[in-house]
Image (cartoon, rainbow, N blue to C red):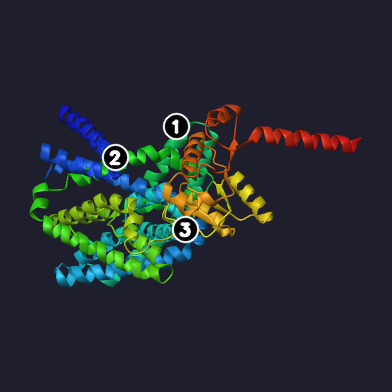
């Protein structure tokens, strides 16, 4: 017992230090857990140990809870809304990537048919855990390339279930390929029908009952019961744990409890996922990695190029060159679900330990370099083409004696409409890409960038403006923008909205031509309106 506690304490300490370091380089915490597993495995000589079975089991339920949370995102309404992007683009990407990789694995590297199928399917998947958070954080999720990338990721997440089911049947040597495919389809259909009829009623009743009890621990225990129960039922009838959890998530996604359920299990899911990736790390043989480094790097580059090419060719038929390139960069890596596929294949002796270690190394390296690629996706794409969606990259405007509206929140939208109604020549600048896209959709000249940057000031011809209206809310942003504008063009006519007297006093040291106090102006209009109504009554 003491030795186990020492291992757990050391693992947590190492994981914390590594992840703090990796965070500075925007590298996923997944890599930190994998590296921790490798380090601890070599310190305590885990390789080949049978005592890792319990850890593998705990780790497997990390994937179970990940699939459950993905199921929560897969409501039928969302799938229906993006069905063309998801099912057409997603299927084509997975299918063509798998076919090309299978041909290479089977004919060039002489792997068996079963092993080649596993390699092809696993390498066709990308990393939802890394790419999706980046798209949300950068707001690229609302861009055309972001929307198409998310749709492909959604299909890949859905495809994991039949892939894992397929592995279960591939481990049965007595079945032909036709039998495998037929059984996969029939059994999957059967369990889905069961879960969405009787299972759905039971899940809805349990959540409703526990919610009415108004006890957080009871609600949480009900969620765990649903996840584990659905997983165990699926496993008992010959499927993977993940299938049951995923379907349970989809059922709950159709109820009013899905947001609460997702927030309640978030920390537990991350902890179990950490255990899963730690267990993956224990399977990495560092000496084997160094001896085969050239093969690992070579095949990694080959796989990423194949996927990037497939995605680019798919996207270029529906989007411009820039969106196609960025989609290819965002999705060319090998994703975390490959680990689940390799783990299941190893446990069922479908692939050899040596091949499994080799495939895991390729996936780990792929996920290590992915954060660097997605965080610099515009710089990489700009090698081939530069376009509107790159922040602060603005072509010089032709307007003169124009008005600039900085910010496009509610106030900015009202200002823009008033200017348009009065026939004033104006343009909009915002650092919120979603706002820029909305403004352009409404027919306004809007640009994505920061008004405190010199290239933006030059491109928007700030020195030739009639006025600049600042509608942003943050006091710090107002200070930075106004100081930058006046440093570039001291005679700028700045009109700034302030929210309080204190804010006006703070900004009074800057040579701002005009302040508009939001609350005072609103109060004056209220009084004026009240008095006019009173006069009308008399």
**SS category of the residue bearing label 1:** helix
Residue 215 in the image, given as x and y percentages of width and height: 49, 31
Instruction: Name the residue beneath numbered marker 1.
Output: 217
Say few, some or many: other residues with alpha carbon within 10 Å of mark 2 (under 14 / 14 to 19 / 20 or more). Answer: few
Residue toward you, 176 or 366:
366
| Residue 24: numbered disc | 2
Say few, some or many: other residues with alpha carbon within 10 Å of mark 3 (under 14 / 14 to 19 / 20 or more). Answer: few
> Mark 2 or mark 1, which has the lower sequence index?
2
> Mark 3 or mark 2, which has the lower sequence index?
2
* Quadrant in the picture for residue 39: top left
> Mark 3 or mark 1, which has the lower sequence index?
1
Residue 176 in the image, given as x and y percentages of width and height: 25, 71
Residue toward you, 330 or 16:
330
Mark closer to the observer (3, 1): 3
In the visual, does 410 lie left or right of 108?
right
For the point 9% across and 51% down, which residue is it? 290
Residue 433 in the image, given as x and y percentages of width and height: 48, 51
In the visual, does 84 lie left or right of 379?
right
Q: Is residue 12 above or below residue 156?
A: above
Residue toward you, 226 or 55:
55
For the point 20% across and 43% down, which residue is it? 35
**SS category of the residue bearing label 2:** loop
For the point 92% across and 35% down, which residue is it? 538
| Residue 396: numbered disc | 3
């Amino acid at each position: 017992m003491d030795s186990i506690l020492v291992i757990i304490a050391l693992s947590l300490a190492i994981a914390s230090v590594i992840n703090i370091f990796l965070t500075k380089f925007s590298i996923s915490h997944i890599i930190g857990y994998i590296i921790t597993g490798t380090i601890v495995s070599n310190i305590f000589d885990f390789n080949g140990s049978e005592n890792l079975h319990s850890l593998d089991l705990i780790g497997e339920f990390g994937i179970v809870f990940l699939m459950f949370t993905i199921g929560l995102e897969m409501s039928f309404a969302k799938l229906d809304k993006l069905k063309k992007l998801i099912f057409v683009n997603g299927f084509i990407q997975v299918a063509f990537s798998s076919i090309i990789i299978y041909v290479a694995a089977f004919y060039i590297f002489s792997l068996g048919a079963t092993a080649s199928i596993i390699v092809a399917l696993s390498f066709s998947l990308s990393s939802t855990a890394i790419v999706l958070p980046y798209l949300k954080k950068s707001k690229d999720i609302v861009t055309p390339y972001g929307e198409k990338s998310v749709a492909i990721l959604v299909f890949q997440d859905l495809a994991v279930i039949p892939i894992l089911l397929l592995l279960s049947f591939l481990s049965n040597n007595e079945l032909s390929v036709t039998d495998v495919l037929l059984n996969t389809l029939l059994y999957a259909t059967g369990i889905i029908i069961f879960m969405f009829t009787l299972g759905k009623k039971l899940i809805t009743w349990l959540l409703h009952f526990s919610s009415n009890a108004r006890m957080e621990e009871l609600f949480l225990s009900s969620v765990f019961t649903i996840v584990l129960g659905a997983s165990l039922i699926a496993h008992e009838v010959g499927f993977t744990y993940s299938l049951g959890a995923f379907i349970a998530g989809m059922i709950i996604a159709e109820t009013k409890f899905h947001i609460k359920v997702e927030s309640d299990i978030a920390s537990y899911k991350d902890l179990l996922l950490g255990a899963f990736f730690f267990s993956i790390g224990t399977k990495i043989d560092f000496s084997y990695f160094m001896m085969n480094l050239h093969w690992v790097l070579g095949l990694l580059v080959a796989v990423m190029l194949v996927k990037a090419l497939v995605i680019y060719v798919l996207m270029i038929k529906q989007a411009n060159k820039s969106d196609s390139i960025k989609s290819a960069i965002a999705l060319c890596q090998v994703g975390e679900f490959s680990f689940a596929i390799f783990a299941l294949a190893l446990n069922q002796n479908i692939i050899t330990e040596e091949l499994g270690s080799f495939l895991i190394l390729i996936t780990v390296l792929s996920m290590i370099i992915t954060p660097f690629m997605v965080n610099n996706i515009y710089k990489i794409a700009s090698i081939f083409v530069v376009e509107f969606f790159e922040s602060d990259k603005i072509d010089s405007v032709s307007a003169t004696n124009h008005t600039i509206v900085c910010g496009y929140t509610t106030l900015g939208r009202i200002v823009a409409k008033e200017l348009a109604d009065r026939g004033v020549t104006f343009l909009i600048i915002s650092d919120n890409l979603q706002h820029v896209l909305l403004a352009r959709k409404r027919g306004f000249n809007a640009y994505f960038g920061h008004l405190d940057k010199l290239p933006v000031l030059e491109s928007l011809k700030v020195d030739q403006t009639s006025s600049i209206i600042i509608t942003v809310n943050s006091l710090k942003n107002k200070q930075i923008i106004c100081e930058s504008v006046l440093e570039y063009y001291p005679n700028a006519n700045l009109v700034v909205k302030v929210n309080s007297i204190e804010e006006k006093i703070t900004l009074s040291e800057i040579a701002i031509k005009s302040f508009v106090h939001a609350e005072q102006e609103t109060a004056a209009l209220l009084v004026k309106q009240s008095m006019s109504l009173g006069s009308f009554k008399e």
